Image (spheres, rainbow, N blue to C red):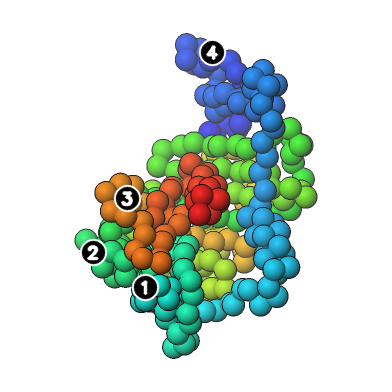
């Protein structure tokens, strides 16, 4: 709201009192809920931190267990001998089993189900059988000082066709997501790790403004907290991806011989649920 951000606690008086702003709808006290039902406390861990922990444990088992910059492009089941795995380097390696944990645009899945990786259809609104959600998401992370950093772990700011989320991920860091309703293919920022930024001069950018400035413009009149978070974020820390989803795979097997699928490769989830990584870990536990 252009008049500023107002904190009304858990009051619903904005429903009948026009002088009360509806900027703040409700608090969800996780600690109080856990105490009430005698449940363990939950927390948030930044994904790179979790990956580092897991990689360190894997390295204890085998020093060169991870090979960077190598993709699985295909496979061949060889019966009792396991699986022949084809890599992007042209090399073929033998394995007892292959777990396709290669995300929503899985090449392992593509071969198993006869799909084409990222094949666009209907003007980009469908890719590899996944339907565009109607939203793109910008994401970033920065270290900043917030007065309620240790009291409030998660905030959601909602407006017409867009919303903004912040989450405490430890050590003074705040991770944020900005969801925006737009046609697919509107690129304003890099797509992920190791990619070049397209913050200026990218598709759809005619003004030359930075991605952070662009996002601040989308949230003009919103809470000062949103603008503060964006101001503290380095331009190079902003990523963007279009959000695609697919229906649950209920009728086809997730496995073929010595090959199986895991996580987003078989049951992708929208980031709103905050469960994609958790479900992949559960898959691994079952395996």
Hey, which quadrant is residue 11 in on the image? top right
The answer to the question of whether label 1 and label 3 lie on touching residues, with beta carbons closer than 8 A, is no
Would residue 79 be seen by someone viewing this image from the given angle?
yes
Q: Residue at x 40, y 72 (%)?
A: 80
Specify which label sits upstream in the sequence, 4 or 1.
Answer: 4
The residue singled out by tag 4 in the image is: 13
Specify which label sits upstream in the sequence, 2 or 4.
Answer: 4
The residue furthest left is 122
Would residue 185 be seen by someone viewing this image from the given angle?
no
Disc 4 element:
helix
- Residue 43, percent across and down? 68, 40
The residue furthest bottom is 90
Mark in the foreground, 3 or 4? 3
Specify which label sits upstream in the sequence, 2 or 3.
Answer: 2
Q: Using the numbered discs, state the Cα–Cα distance from disc 2 to disc 1 in whole angstroms.
A: 35 Å
Mark in the foreground, 4 or 1? 1
Hey, which quadrant is residue 19 in on the image? top right
Q: Using the numbered discs, state the Cα–Cα distance from disc 2 to disc 3 in whole angstroms.
A: 20 Å
- Residue 66, percent across and down? 61, 73
- Residue 21, percent across and down? 54, 23
The residue singled out by tag 1 in the image is: 79
Q: Using the numbered discs, state the Cα–Cα distance from disc 1 to disc 3 in whole angstroms.
A: 25 Å
Mark in the foreground, 1 or 3? 1
Disc 3 element:
loop
The residue singled out by tag 3 in the image is: 249
The residue carrying pointer 4 sits among few (fewer than 14), some (14 to 19) or many (20 or more) residues within 10 Å by Cα, namely: few
Q: Residue at x 53, y 15 (%)?
A: 12
Specify which label sits upstream in the sequence, 3 or 4.
Answer: 4
Specify which label sits upstream in the sequence, 2 or 1.
Answer: 1
Comparing 135 with 102, the one in front is 102
State the mark number for residue 121. Answer: 2
Q: Using the numbered discs, state the Cα–Cα distance from disc 3 to disc 4 in whole angstroms.
A: 44 Å
């Amino acid at each position: 709201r252009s008049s500023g951000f107002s904190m009304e606690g858990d009051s619903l008086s904005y429903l009948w009192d026009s002088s009360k702003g509806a900027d703040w709808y409700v608090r969800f006290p996780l600690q109080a809920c856990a105490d009430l039902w005698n449940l363990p406390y939950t927390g948030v861990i930044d994904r790179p931190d979790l990956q580092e922990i897991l990689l360190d444990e894997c390295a204890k088992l085998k020093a060169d267990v991870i090979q960077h910059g190598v993709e699985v492009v295909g496979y061949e089941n060889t019966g009792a001998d396991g699986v022949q795995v084809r890599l992007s380097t042209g090399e073929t390696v033998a394995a007892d089993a292959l777990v396709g944990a290669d995300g929503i645009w899985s090449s392992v899945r593509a071969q198993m189900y006869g799909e084409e990786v990222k094949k666009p259809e209907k003007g980009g609104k469908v890719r590899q059988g996944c339907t565009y959600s109607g939203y793109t998401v910008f994401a970033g992370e920065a270290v900043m000082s917030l007065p309620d950093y240790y009291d409030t772990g998660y905030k959601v700011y909602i407006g017409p066709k867009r919303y903004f989320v912040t989450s405490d991920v430890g050590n003074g860091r705040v991770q944020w997501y900005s969801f925006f309703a737009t046609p697919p293919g509107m690129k304003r920022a890099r797509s992920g790790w190791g990619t070049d930024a397209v913050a200026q001069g990218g598709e759809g950018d005619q003004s030359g403004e930075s991605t952070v400035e662009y996002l601040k413009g989308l949230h003009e009149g919103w809470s000062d907290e949103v603008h503060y978070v964006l101001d503290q974020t380095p331009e190079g820390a902003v990523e963007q991806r279009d959000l695609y989803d697919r229906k649950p795979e209920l009728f086809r097997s997730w496995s073929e011989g010595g090959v199986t699928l895991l996580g987003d490769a078989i049951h992708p989830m929208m980031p709103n649920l905050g469960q994609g990584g958790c479900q992949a870990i559960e898959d691994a536990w079952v395996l």
